[in-house]
Amino acid sequence: MKILLIPLDDRPVTFTFPALVARAARVEAILPPRHLMGSLTRPAQIDELLAFAETTIARQEPAAVIVCLDSLLYGGLITGRRSQDDFKTIMSRLDRVKKWKTLSSRPPVVMAQSSIMRISDNYDNTEEKEYWSRFGREIFEWSACLHRLARGEKPTAGLLESLERRIPADIRQDYLDTRRRNFSTNMTLLKSMNEGYIDHLIFSQDDSGAYGLNVSEKERLISTSAQLGLTDKVSVYAGADEVMQTLLARLLIAEGLRQGSGRTEAAAKRAPGVAVYFSPGGCSAAASRYEGQDIGTTVASHIDASALRYKPGDHFKSGDATTSGDGHPSENNDASQNRPLSANTFTLIIHGPNDRQGDHITLPGLADLSQIDTTEAVSETLFLIEKSTGAGVIIADVAYANGGDPKLIEALLMRPDLLRKVKSYSGWNTAGNTMGSALAIAVAYWFRESGAAAASAASSAGGPGASAAGKGEAKEAEKSLDWHKQCLFVRLVDDWAYQACVRKLLQGEPSTQKLAELIGPYIAKVNAALGMEPSVRLSFPWKRTFEIEISFEGT
């Protein structure tokens, strides 16, 4: 199966990693030339990118297209907050997207993402308009104040007037104009879904607080979607950089079911599911940093968006304590009630904080949350892995934002017997980023293991020539095992070794030489644990220390 991917921008997490997940599923991912994509300071080459998509659909006839519309409508996620393009220009670009299904004799499935413009609570204008360095936090508070007023709440007396005196009128107007343009685009996308040019659409809410104009827009998109009867075709939730992986997971599940018998009961048995455990139990209610909601809400929304079956975890006895699938204490201490999971159900462990989520990045003026106590969670997570059955274990590591839990990974790397049961791990940036990646890696593993990948390849080959798809199948299976291990390698090295341990030692200096020296011992531990020794290149794609790129030689 061929899938055309039009990413959000050229970062590793949005450009290269989704393609690696697709390869792990034995799916052929077609990507645009990277130089066409948007970057930190450079917008995407929109006309060239649209032309590439049109030519690829017409000539290669991919079975599906997964597109991050921000790239084609604005020039990228960041450019969407900075671009001065008018609404008419943006709609002319959308008109070209609407024609995609007419370009091929086999119209592709089209899955799309469109972002709800974020509002960050800081004075960092790296990814914003210039005035954010002077008025960022004031705009954040002003936005929240406007949202509260619209909800009928009464903010602190005089707060709105004080904020509007501190933010120049022309800046407030510019900010509102950009928001209105982007929200009008999203409402147009939503209301035109009945035209059939998009099969599934995700509106992703980037960095957010509990209140703000972005939250108000999210609420309106949800209510309008319900009014139009589109809730099965439209998802609206907190996330951004991981959404292409979520859409890929949804597509793989649909394709896997299509390759089944076609009978509803049989298809339901084939659909992958997750039995969910929160470790420790109370972490489901902990606030998810940068998302304006609790961790449990994030988990539920991502499972739903991925189209996975949800199954609350059975009761497990750990010492004197027993937890239920929702993570809350259970009165039933009979461990014999543990029921083995089916071969297509994963144990999903949400490894989180006791109460307050940590953060490996400390911003000026905010509390230092880079060292939280996760001893209880680590013990519970290891116990849950030991007792797990079914398709394997997924670990969504959300104890910290902006990196994994060092205590968990260090303990896991010392237990190869447990690590072998882990089919997916992720622990980067927000809880939503982590969930989307963790679920997608697991679905890719399921797709390959279920035989759906081979069936899809044979189906794509078509007719008498289908047998050719079987040639070299063993070799491809071996490669896909390597690609799956590469997915785990990237997440462990990036989320644990780099984000949680090494990044702070660089002190803001994107030196590849220093990076290689510092991260080498960590990579050696990951290699030993995974039983692999890839030749990799490390770089700073955006010339900053916030993210690194891990590239495999020979791929």
Image (tube, grey):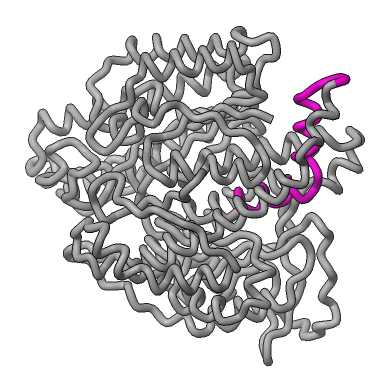
Is residue 537 toward the left or the right of residue 298 in the image?
A: left
> Foreground residue, 432 or 249?
249
> Foreground residue, 406 or 164?
406
- Give coordinates of residue 357: x percent, y percent: 41, 68
Is residue 502 toward the left or the right of residue 456 in the image?
A: left
In the current view of this chain or complex, which residue is farthest to the bottom? 320
- Give coordinates of residue 480: x percent, y percent: 66, 48
Q: Is residue 452 magenta?
A: yes
> Foreground residue, 135 or 475?
475
- Helix, strand or loop for the magenta stretch, by majority: helix
Residue shown at the point (57%, 37%) measured from the top left: 235
Residue shown at the point (48%, 74%) measured from the top left: 525
Q: Is residue 299 magenta?
A: no
In the picture shown, does residue 116 fall above or below 279?
above
Residue shown at the point (15%, 49%) measured from the top left: 158
Residue 355 in view, yes or no: yes
Is residue 184 toward the left or the right of residue 59 in the image?
A: left
> Foreground residue, 23 or 246?
23
Residue 459 placement: quadrant: top right
Residue shown at the point (77%, 50%) measured from the top left: 449
- Give coordinates of residue 427: x percent, y percent: 47, 61
- Give coordinates of residue 200: x percent, y percent: 61, 29
Q: Where the N terminus falls, by quadrant?
A: top right
In the picture shown, does residue 446 fall above or below 78?
below
Q: Which residues are magenta?
A: 439-464
Is residue 108 toward the left or the right of residue 470 in the image?
A: left
